[in-house]
Image (spheres, rainbow, N blue to C red):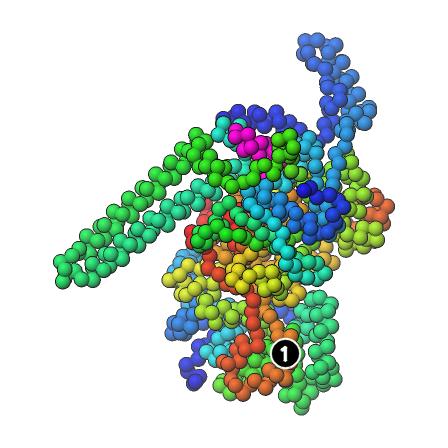
Amino acid sequence: MGNSSLICIRLIVNDLNDDESTVCPMVFSVDDVLKLRKLGICGILSGTLPTATQQNIFLSIPLKLMVEETIWLVLHGYAKLDLIKGPMSRHFNSILESKSDQLWEISRKKLLQSFELQREYKKEQHELKLKQLGLEQSKNDVSATSSSNDNNKFIESSLFVETSNVSSILDYSVDEKREITKSSTSTDLLHYLITNYSTWNNYLLYQSLKEQSYVMLPGGRFGGLYIAYPGDPLRYHSHLTIDSALDYYNDPIDFISLTSGARLGTAVKKLWVIGGVKENKNHTMNETINVEDSGLHSLKLGTITTSFFSIEWAGFG
Amino acid sequence: MEIHSSDSNDRSVIETLVKENLSYFQYWTDVQLEDKALSWRGTDLRLVSGIPPNKLSNDDSEIQREYILPVNMTQHKEEFITLECLDLVFEKLCNKDTRRIILGIVNSDGTIVFYSIYNGIHKPKKN
Amino acid sequence: MAKHNSRLNNVRYKYPLPIHPVETTLPLPELLPHNPFSWIYWFYKYYRLVYSNNEDNLLETKITIDVIGGDSFPHIMVRDKNDMLYLWENGFFGTGTLSRSEPTWYTRMNQIVNGDITLNTGDINELEQITRRRRLERLEFKKLREKLQMELLELKKQSALSGSDIDSNGGLDETESLKRINDLLLKQREQLRDFKALQESYNKQNIGIHDNVMDNLKFDYESLLDENGDLLSLESLELMPVEATFLSFALPVLNITPRELFRKILPNNDNSSYDTVHSFIIHYVAYHFYRSHGWCVRSGIKFGCDYLLYKRGPPFHHAEFCINVMDNDPLYYRSNKNMHDYTWYSRISRVIGGAKKTLILSYVTRQTTKKQIMEWWIKGQYHKVFNSYEISEIIYKRWVPGRNRD
């Protein structure tokens, strides 16, 4: 696959404050928009004229993509990432211009921060796995560039400690991307997207639905994460609203949220769908790494299964 | 028939509330507590079953026995049903060909609401 | 008829709350405008009522509750038929466990058991029957629509077939088959409209569908009768924990002290930490706040929020506002459970907007330390506890630029 055939997704960056920025994936080429549509990815057209801003039926390029769509496209080798650098993205630029291991480190810190908000025993599990991976000692010399390659490997693994079976997919695909684009910045960007702008389980739900040939659009208007169409949205009505991923083993189902979601769904003729990622509990890191030879596509959901339930008002009570 | 303070077991209380609601408010017939139980976090989950007065979905060919999982909902606390638990309910408490069960959500405000829950991704019912 | 109903309602739901400070045991004497002595006597009586012996204002016997389900998911039941009615008629407290809101199960079942249902002339047109009838009508309508859609599909198939071999057969040409489809469409539309009109006219005369609804029920009425052939009273009135608290702590209506009530409805109340009571306190504070501003506050679970506010009560108007109690305590709102993401706001505002109500986010803020709160709580000084919270509100509304321009 040559570079020319890759869809170019440009990331627009805005700094919010010193350590936060927003990233918006955009596609500017009409040809790319067409390619995306054929892949079952619609995005949202967002280009408008300053003098006719209310005409939102007539919007044009750029096409705005969901972060999950962006990750899917890059992981499956359909697209490359490109950063649009502007005056608004001072902070982001400074990160990207610094050494890549520093980016990894920031991503890792962010992920660790998000872990901290989670339940106590999750943290324990996390530390347990860190120990297993021997990351404890290498923490101190992360900044040392000499051992950065090894460190990166470890850090990459640790990032997805909750879903360890997945991290090595990323690990692998990142390597593949390196060969394709010869640009470590693009993979850094991908990594940055994954750790900062989406939760991995939401992405896995997206991927699972995509493999069942559903077409997803953002679901905010219907109170969910995605709405799903059985085919192209111009040909079909959407009949599913997908809620954000639940932790399969630990999150209790919130029935207040479920009833309001299903109630809204019934009003707009959609089923309310909850789902989560089932982890293979016996699965170890080494097993996943061994699968690397068989290639990215056979690896896709090999050891991951998702579980969905569809809910609607029962018609009484 | 009435439940009194002495029955402090959560499950038996909501099972009875759901049974009474189906029998005397929704006009279901032959409402009963199923024998099969699933041990979940120290409690035994059982389904309630019964025959509704009319078809619940236009997709059904005829009126059939429906299975209800009673659950609690309050404003202050969360229940302990997870996705894993729902999978186990379908696996252990239902027949192989069961496509849906009904959640009987018992609120703290005297109401019970019922939601159909299908295993996997399902197409919405006609109309 | 609407007027008639509202007059009846005004009489039936005369009191906004279950205690009536002026005129319980001692009704005021008649006030004769032309007789000054009657004024003096009236004021004397009024003074006695309001300022002297407050014991007179209490209920003769307090209402007994039954708490079932343990302290993790308590259900607070009122079993006595008169008590149920009293709580409903005086401020709309509680919900009938076998009804939509007002506990009407006994009346409804009595009608069915005695075969009175066809005599129903509008006075006892219970909410449950109306809902039931509407749903069944909707179902019948959908069946007809499906049948008609099949007819249309059939015709389309036929014309597609005949269209394909126009030349060989000299069959229908395209415009002809199009015309036939259009005609059928028009005819069907009319049919559906007529059917709806028929249903509505049945509604007005109170005949039709709901007669055979009840006949079709293979319901075993016998099981509902006692040995004398009288209908058993199977319904209870359930009070939300906040309602029971209000009727025990704020008004002396329930036959239970607040401390005793909390022991039954809150987990581990005896050695409680602030964490176990925090959520209950902020929900009660909000409930009390709106009750004391004269609103009739009922559960909003149906709409995914905490409370509904009625100006007077369900028989008078629809609820205008939905209240969602927001935890404004930094110690708690950052926890996963209380952190709402954008989709939550979008969802709840769509559900509430769809019901033509206004969503109010009601932020409850603690004004003193947790330690202080717990000191008061353990001493049973609940008024001090509830007084240490402040409420501020924000209206949240979906705004669509295209639709909200005028």
> What amino acid is at disc 1?
His
Please give the range of residues in magenta.
Answer: C99-116
Residue drawn at (56%, 85%) of the image: A292
Residue drawn at (65%, 77%) of the image: A282
Given the current orientation, which residue lies at the most extreme front position? C227
Chain of the residue under the numbered disc 1 shown in the image: A
| On screen, residue C78 above or below A191 | above
Pick the residue in front: C186 or C50: C186
Please give the count of numbered marks on the rendered protein: 1
Describe the element under mark 1 as helix, strand or loop.
Answer: loop
| On screen, residue A272 above or below C44 | below
Pick the residue in front: A81 or C207: C207
The image quadrant where one finds the N terminus of chain A is: bottom left
Residue drawn at (54%, 64%) of the image: B96
Q: Position of residue C156 (x, y in %)?
A: 27, 55
Q: Position of residue C367 (x, y in %)?
A: 77, 50
Residue named by callout 1:
A283
Whether residue C100 appears in magenta in the rendering, the answer is yes
